[in-house]
Image (cartoon, grey):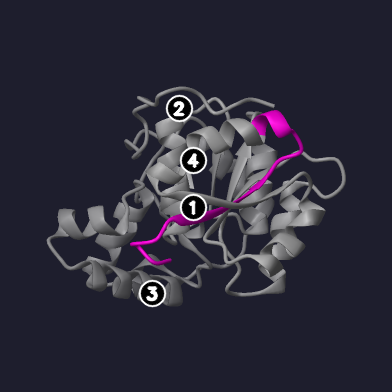
Amino acid sequence: MNSDAATRVVLVDDQELVRSGLRRILRRRDGFDIVAECADGNELPAALADHAVDVVVMDLRMKHVDGIEATRRLRAAATDAPPVLALTTFDDDELLSGALRAGAAGFILKDSGAEDLIRAVRRVAAGESWLDPAVTARVLATYRVAAGTRAAATIDALTARERDVLVAIGTGLSNVEIAESLVISELTVKSHIGRIFAKLGLRDRAAAIVYAFDHGLVSPSTPQRGDRRDGQGDVPRS
């Protein structure tokens, strides 16, 4: 994504009232461009074919093709498909863990503050992850059970600095924040993340957060970025 350009967003939600509310939050003057809207997951492929997109904000419960299936199809169709931020009213651990398994880069509840939604969309569009701190620990526990007992590479495969970066990812820091905290360049952070993913066989940042929880590098009591809710209003509910 071009950092100087507006973040191009596709909204996927079956309720016009919700999409209207999201449009009021993700405004052009704040750096967002709503390039398309879909009322169901089955409309998403056509929208992506017609527009260049940085991030998809996707409701999980829709009548025909729900958000989980739409995310799964999107990830299977192209390796360079835009990332998905799952958006739901439902505090449903299995639903949200299903979104992660399908390939969503993160999730946020619809009762989150507007500023949290803005931060989440920006993070995910930048190739990072956002897991709503209100339910992260429970959702990750459900995710692990559903994922089974697949063998994972040992943490010993990482260098000390790579481990530091993984811990920072697990606590929700962005690349810029990791660079500042470790006093290294953002480019170096990106290089470390690439090696971490390769060594541990991780698909994306959300998987790295799960790994960090699984291996005791962070815990449910570890403060997460985004815990502070100081938004200008709530995300519209459906």
In front: 143, or 125? 125
Left or right, 196 with respect to 45, comes to left
Mark closest to the chain's N terminus, 3 or 1: 3
Which quadrant is home to the N terminus? bottom left
Mark closest to the chain's N terminus, 4 or 2: 4
Q: Nearer the viewer, mark 2 or mark 1?
A: 2
> Mark 3 highlights which residue?
194
Mark closest to the chain's N terminus, 3 or 4: 4
> Mark 4 highlights which residue?
26
Q: Which residues are magenta?
A: 1-18
> Mark 2 highlights which residue?
113
Q: Nearer the viewer, mark 3 or mark 1?
A: 3
Mark 1: which amino acid? Val
Disc 4 to disc 1, C-alpha distance: 29 Å
Mark 3 and mark 1 in contact? Answer it, CB < 8 Å. no
Does the image show residue 102?
yes
Local SS, label 2: loop
User: How many neighbours does mark 4 have within 10 angstroms: few (below 14), some (14-19), or many (20 or more)?
Assistant: many
Q: Is residue 5 magenta?
A: yes
Residue 83 location, x and y as percent? Answer: 56, 60
Mark closest to the chain's N terminus, 3 or 2: 2
> Mark 1 highlights which residue?
210
Which residue shows up at 65% across the image and 36% down it? 19
Residue 231 location, x and y as percent? Answer: 39, 26
In front: 83, or 205? 83
Disc 3 to disc 2, C-alpha distance: 32 Å
Mark 4: which amino acid? Leu
Left or right, 221 with respect to 132, comes to left
Disc 3 to disc 4, C-alpha distance: 30 Å
Q: Is residue 169 magenta?
A: no
Residue 215 location, x and y as percent? Answer: 42, 54
Disc 3 to disc 1, C-alpha distance: 16 Å
